[in-house]
Image: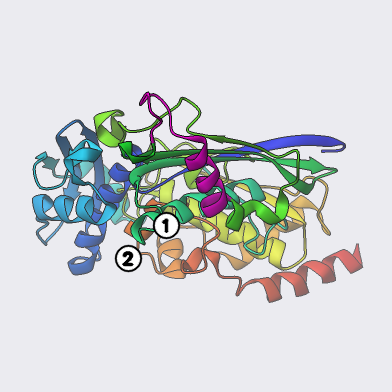
Amino acid sequence: MKGKYFITSESVGKGHPDKVCDQISDAVLDQVLKDDPMGRVACETFITTGLVIVGGEITTKTFVNVQSLVRNLLTDIGYTDHKYGFSASTCSILNAIVGQSPDISQGVDAGGAGDQGIMIGYACEETPELMPLPIMLAHKLVRRIEEVRKSKVLDYLGPDCKSQVTVEYLDDVPQRVDTVVLACQHTEKILNAKGDRITEEAKREIIKVIADPVVGHLTDKNTKYYVNETGKFVVGGPQSDTGMTGRKIIVDTYGGVVSHGGGAFSGKDPTKVDRSATYMARYVAKNIVAAKLAEKCWIQFGYAIGKAEPVSVMVDTFGTGKVTEQKLVDLVRKHFDLTPRGIITALDLRRPIYQNTAAYGHFGREEFSWEKIQKADILAREGLAAAAVA
C-alpha cells in the first residue's frame, strides 16, 4: 500500500484460557507421538471455572494419562493458587476422547489429505524472522510478561495476559510503534486506595519493565500506552473467560496482516492438512522471500479430503516479485512435495514438537523445521535465471 497506514496485531500469553486449551490439546498430541508416531489425533479442550474437558478423536497404540498431563501443564503455566481463580490441584477434569472415524482413516491411510480446506502461508522482509513486525512485537511482549512474572521481577502479575501493538507504515515500510495495549492479570497488591483501579505507579512500572525493552526503540513521544484500561484485572483466566482450542488462529499466524485458511492447528496430528500444509505454505513463502525472489509472498494451497496433491496452488507477491507468479508456482510444484506424506517427511512432523507451538505463534521461531530456508539457494538460482531469460 502507498502512503501512511496503520496495522494492529495482538497476542495472548500462556495463561489466557484459549491458549491454555491449545497447550493441553497439543500436549496430548505430543504424548501420543512420543510413543506412537503414527497415532491419529484430533483433540479439543474446553476450560471454564473449575473445569477442564478434553475431548475429540484419538486412535493410538499408547496411553495418555489425561488427568496427570492437564494438572502438570496447568501448574507449569502458573495456575497454582486460588487467588488467580483457578487451581491445577483442585479443578475437575473430564476425559471425553473417542476413536477416529474409519471413514476418514481409509482416505488418510491411502496417502490422502485428512481434510479439505485452504491453507495460507506468508513471509515478508519486515523483520529478521521474515514476519510482519506487529505480530512479532506482540508475541515478544507477552513473552516478556511471562519472564518478569516467573522471575518475580514483578511479583504481582498473574498467568493471564494479552498484548496489542499498532505499527505506523509509510509506503509499506514500518516507521514507528503508534500504540501499545497491555492487559496483565495481577493481585490486589497494586490497586489504589478505593480498590477499583491499579495505581499510576504500577502502570509506569509495567511500561518500563515490560514494554520498553521490547518496543522502546520504535516508540516516540506520541506513542500511546493503554495498561489494564478497564481499571483492574484481578479476576482473570478460566474464572472470567471460557477457553476453547483453536480460537486464537490470527494470533497463531500473521496477526491479521494477511488472510487465514479454514482451520486451527492445535490438537491435530500432521495428517490434518489444516496444520501441516499451513506449515508447508509458510516454509515455501519464507524460502521464496529468503531467495530474494520477492519482498513479500502470500501462498494459498487448496486440498480435497482423501486426495494427495493439492487441487490448487496460488502465489501473490503484491507486485514485489522478481519473476512472475506463474513461474513461482512452477518452482513451488517442482521443488516442494505438497502431498501430506511429502510434507510430513520434509518437515519431520511425526515428532512431539507441538506443545511449544501452542503459545507465542507458530511462525517466526527458528526452532521449527518449517522456518528453515535450505531451499532458498536453488530457488534463487532457477528463479533469477528465468528472470534473466525473460
* Viewer can see residue 337: yes
State yes or no: residue 29 in magenta.
no
The type of residue carrying mark 1 is: Val
- Circle 1 SS class: helix
The extreme front residue here reads: 193
User: x, y percentage for residue 224?
Assistant: 66, 36
User: x, y percentage for residue 10?
Assistant: 53, 40
Which residue is more in the foreground, 131 or 288?
A: 131
Residue 331's place in the image compared with 255, above or below, is below
**Left or right of 5: which side holds 390?**
right
Q: Which residues are magenta?
A: 191-211
State yes or no: residue 195 in magenta.
yes
**Left or right of 357: which side holds 9?**
right
The type of residue carrying mark 2 is: Arg
Residue 331's place in the image compared with 22, above or below, is below
Residue occupied by mark 1? 148
Q: Earlier in the sequence, mark 1 or mark 2?
A: 1
Which residue is more in the foreground, 13 or 263?
A: 13
